[in-house]
Amino acid sequence: MQIDLNCDMGESFGPYTLGLDEQVMPLITSANVACGFHAGDPQVLRRTLALAARYGVGVGAHVSFPDLAGFGRRELQVAPQELENDVLYQIGAISAFCRVAGVPLRHVKPHGALYNMAQRDEATAGAIARAVAAYDPGLLLFVQAGSVMARVAGEVGLPVAAEVFADRAYTPDGALASRKLPGSVIHDPDAVAERALRMVTEGRIIAIDGTEIAVAAETICVHGDTPGAVLLIQRIRERLAQAGVAVRPPLTAGAGI
Amino acid sequence: MQIDLNCDMGESFGPYTLGLDEQVMPLITSANVACGFHAGDPQVLRRTLALAARYGVGVGAHVSFPDLAGFGRRELQVAPQELENDVLYQIGAISAFCRVAGVPLRHVKPHGALYNMAQRDEATAGAIARAVAAYDPGLLLFVQAGSVMARVAGEVGLPVAAEVFADRAYTPDGALASRKLPGSVIHDPDAVAERALRMVTEGRIIAIDGTEIAVAAETICVHGDTPGAVLLIQRIRERLAQAGVAVRPPLTAGAGI
Amino acid sequence: MQIDLNCDMGESFGPYTLGLDEQVMPLITSANVACGFHAGDPQVLRRTLALAARYGVGVGAHVSFPDLAGFGRRELQVAPQELENDVLYQIGAISAFCRVAGVPLRHVKPHGALYNMAQRDEATAGAIARAVAAYDPGLLLFVQAGSVMARVAGEVGLPVAAEVFADRAYTPDGALASRKLPGSVIHDPDAVAERALRMVTEGRIIAIDGTEIAVAAETICVHGDTPGAVLLIQRIRERLAQAGVAVRPPLTAGAGI
Amino acid sequence: MQIDLNCDMGESFGPYTLGLDEQVMPLITSANVACGFHAGDPQVLRRTLALAARYGVGVGAHVSFPDLAGFGRRELQVAPQELENDVLYQIGAISAFCRVAGVPLRHVKPHGALYNMAQRDEATAGAIARAVAAYDPGLLLFVQAGSVMARVAGEVGLPVAAEVFADRAYTPDGALASRKLPGSVIHDPDAVAERALRMVTEGRIIAIDGTEIAVAAETICVHGDTPGAVLLIQRIRERLAQAGVAVRPPLTAGAGI
């Protein structure tokens, strides 16, 4: 039994530092690396890819709307063809640093507002899927199981990895509960680690209303921007290790690997 | 006997159109395509690569300082490591569109202020050469013969193509005469076509002081931003054709081809 | 009887030229000048303000979402406080060029996607109104009569000018008909000039369904990006002149004047 | 006897935080506020101006080359007219936030590479001086005494404040010693505080070669980006207070005040 731990990396920019990448990289198995549209720059990409290569972490393109000031968290109404090209541009840019670091590009994960739109909006999901498939149909797309993005990726034949959030509450129908609801973010490290374990080993989780629901979990999204977040990743790893669950990148038959 | 004709392409941006790409692409054999740093954007890249593919034109990355407002024509004091990464980023970005268009990336040409600095400055030339070689040591670098850039490219083993300007006057030592000097830009189409032909067939040109000098010519830089410029390319092609000179991309043993 | 003719100006950027500003400026009475967020740059602002000053044209800030690549035509979900500050920044920037050109800033008009959102969305309209009022409560806001923007401006005490579009069809309830509908854009210059005249002198227009509706018209939006558009402005002016309608900027008691 | 303490403020951007503005603002008398070209954004400007207003700190425009990725530390060869307009744009933008915060704009200080070029380069200094004088000839320009910038400001009639650096070594001719030289940055807080005091009360400092030189000191530049830097400002203030030196903004008869 195995699971992937993915985390956003390479979100520093110019003189600005964000995230504890040096501490987090050794603890994760997939890095979602910013490509310069919401964060990151060529210098940060070079450093981040070297760091990922050193620890054997799987590298993914964390593609975004072009919105540095808003950190890619603001929805932008981009025409599908434009979005497809924006995604291609970012995948290409990070691929150059993968090549120089001697590591393959393994996955793509939309960031922020683009991630949220892709889970629910057909046109957005289609643009992302077409860009990824056109570049390399072996690239894994990180998606929420049951989402529009998951379905659309399947339709164009892209392999996907089902992503879960161990520190977030779920609604009874398997969606993330809004951050505005009380109890939607789980802060107790032991509780988060336990949820992560049950998601992986049983494929089940207690939803926000107390009912038990099924979740597909191939990769767990973790955070790396505070000392507490780093400790949480360590706790999750310990709990998984105790239960005999291996932590490694998701399998893929991707041409890029 | 053969020669390459290269021209800047893909310099439109967002709502703005620059250059007569649709008219010029059928007339040239190498396109220096803007990568988004001084001009171009993902949409323009997609269209420009499709156009290059349609006419079998060799594609190059026209890499620049990050300076959209200044069109890459303003010198920027970038640390060599930063410049190396900026160049890598641009090569990667355009490569994604090459892949989707089904054409190889064949060459790299620095743009504007970066081009000028690279011909004379060791650190700038080194950064460009390292970026290109790290990405693909088979990529051709377009250089002025005798320049620092040409020497540095040779030192890292990069293949180069010697570039000449048929409509520009040369100094007796083989450099371009300053645009500020009277007579530095040649406007008569017949004179330009004749100079182009002599550069190719005899490797010689009359310098601005009347002396005859040797020039190495593997690719001629032409312009495509005015109707007159388009006519000039046609005149050059006619003159070369009359003399039996074939117009085709420069030969290379590049891994990327 | 009088009317204002407003037109977007200063939309060039860096090496890129957009609009026939030199031909159009003498024909209009209000210029909506791009502030660098969707178009324009400090050089273009300097030139455009000098041109407006030469012809005595009223200057307005054409404020936008920050989206150069999308020309401000893509909706962006900006938090109201952020939007308020983005608008303030742009008003401040253009004000420096007004001061140097010796002309007052007289009005503000949202651009593109921001204009459309402001007419219908309370939060967007509120952010714009607060920014304008905080900077100078005497600035005129150009609005569509009956819109959310018009109402919200009134609530904060901002003076407004009701804007009409002589070349666009209206729905029976006084809104602009979607550009996707056949007949939504009127191309015949005489018809457009006649509509402009009736809007001004009678406050009435034939809607897209043939019914006659009332419209409030204090400023007519015209375009200046094609030779045909310039001729159309001239036709409108001739028709207004024949009918004895004066063309001049809207009256305002603005503190900035 | 009095002296001004100036510090760079408002250098955060989007999701990125830089500087301990909340701790530093109460300790200084002049804030050089980033205007969005090298750092800062409309949100940061709004917050920073509110903070300056709360503590009665004099506000200045910290104008820069347009270079967010390089934090304005990279020299850019901008034509003087373009630079003049870039400076005007930034002064205008910050002025809107001054107006809303109810505080005057009092000074202008070039940032980073622009500061360095302005001290030695006539064309750069002239462009800055013309922009400031065109906007408001009462604005104070922060300059190094004896620099080209100081002379040029005088020629256009701009008031200046002579700036010194208490933690930097000086050459015998009164220039800053290169940061590459050993001993060029002074780290001992007591030594820095003592130097600050002597600069203010005696107008003298020990140069890097041990000779004593004269310095004109109307404002001392301090830093606010590390806890140690904050403590250093406090030490300087204590030492000045013990000696009876008042800390307040420089006097000016500026029209903007």
Image: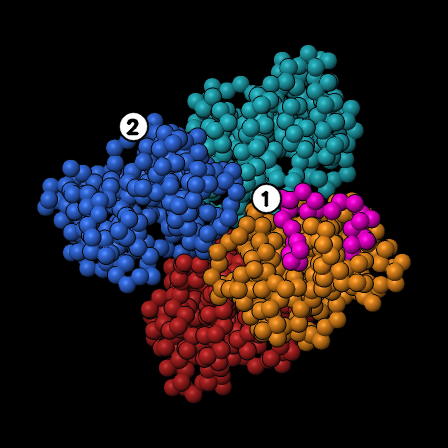
Chain colours: A blue, B cyan, C orange, D red
Q: Position of residue B147 (x, y in %)?
A: 56, 32
Looking at the rendered structure, the kind of residue marked 1 is Gly
Q: Residue at x 46, y 38 (%)?
A: A127
Q: Is residue C68 visible?
A: no
Q: Residue at x 78, y 54 (%)?
A: C195
Q: Position of residue D138 (x, y in %)?
A: 64, 76
Above or below residue B120? Residue C93 is: below
Quadrant in the picture for residue C135: bottom right
Q: Is residue C176 visible?
A: yes
Q: Residue furthest top?
A: B244
* Part of the protein shown in magenta: C171-196
- Between C141 and B139, the one nearer to me in the picture: C141
Residue hosting label 2:
A253
Q: Residues within 10 Å of mark 2 (few under 14, many from 20)?
A: few
Q: Residue furthest right?
A: C242
**Quadrant of the frame with the N terminus of chain B:** top right
Residue hosting label 1:
B14
- Between A7 and C113, the one nearer to me in the picture: C113
Image mark for residue C42? none
Residue A205 placement, left or right of C113:
left
Residue C224 placement, left or right of D249:
right
Distance (Cα) linking label 2 and label 1? 37 Å
Looking at the rendered structure, the kind of residue marked 2 is Ala
- Between A126 and B76, the one nearer to me in the picture: A126
Above or below residue A191? Residue C136 is: below
Q: Residue at x 15, y 37 (%)?
A: A1
Q: Secondary structure at mark 2?
A: loop
- Is C74 magenta? The answer is no
Q: Mostly what secondary structure, the magenta segment? A: loop
Residue B9 placement, left or right of A151:
right
- Between C59 and B126, the one nearer to me in the picture: C59
